[in-house]
Amino acid sequence: MFRKKVLPFILFILVALAVGGLSTLVSKEGMEASKVLLQPPWAPPDWLFSVVWPILYTLMGISAALVWRRTSERTGPTVIWAVQLFFNAMWSVFYFALAMRGFAFFWLLALIVLVFIMILRFRRVSLAAALLQIPYFIWICFAARLNLAVWMLNR
């Protein structure tokens, strides 16, 4: 029972949080350096990111586990979930660690497309799983707007 019902939730949440934590660790120095960049007046305070991201990674994990538990066709949805998670992690590396803000913006557009596809794929299996991805989708759309604004302000 535990293995089939609970373990997928624990594993998917831990993987999502670990990927997020690793990308933060790799990008930490760049995050500090980016504090001197000009920001648009509507940019959220720094502390908000450290609150929002763990919640979003947890929702990502729960969503993936719901899909994993409800279908025998796990490969497609799991692959799209893993690919978008990779794109998510690499965005931080490009934006912060490598200071490639323009490239990061276009990378983020690709992530938005991937998350949209993931939502559609998850919807075929579980409406709840798809809906749990909506806050993430909205947040990365906002992040794209912020990324673009910071890139333009600091060219």
Image (cartoon, helix red, strand yellow):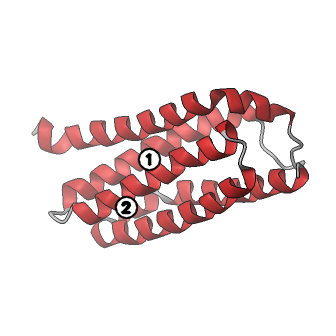
Percent position (x, y) of residue 51?
Answer: 61, 34
Query: Looking at the rendering, which quadrant does residue 125 occupy?
Result: bottom left
Amino acid residing under circle 1: Leu
Residue 80 has which mark? 2
Frontmost residue, 78 versus 96: 96
Q: At 81% from the left edge and 53% from the top edge, which residue is drawn?
A: 151
132 left or right of 155 in image: left
Frontmost residue, 66 versus 83: 83
Frontmost residue, 61 versus 89: 89
Percent position (x, y) of residue 91?
Answer: 59, 48
Between the residue at mark 1 and the residue at mark 2, the CA separation in whole angstroms equals: 16 Å
Percent position (x, y) of residue 111?
Answer: 54, 60
Label 2: which secondary element: helix
84 left or right of 46 in image: left
Neighbour tally class for label 1: few under 14, some 14-19, many 20 plus, Cα within 10 Å: many
Up-down relation of residue 136 to residue 37 (above or below)? below
Frontmost residue, 17 versus 63: 17
Up-down relation of residue 140 to residue 110 (above or below)? above
Percent position (x, y) of residue 99?
Answer: 72, 42
- Do the CB atoms of the residues marked 1 and 2 lie less than 8 Å apart? no
Q: At 45% from the left edge and 50% from the top edge, which residue is drawn?
A: 85
Task: Say whether disc 1 or disc 2 marks the residue closer to the N-terminus.
Answer: 1
Disc nearest the viewer among 1 and 2: 2
128 left or right of 50 in image: left
Residue 132 has which mark? none
Label 1: which secondary element: helix
Residue 59 has which mark? 1
Q: At 53% from the left edge and 36% from the top edge, which residue is drawn?
A: 23
Amino acid residing under circle 2: Ile
Q: At 68% from the left edge and 26% from the top edge, which residue is drawn?
A: 29
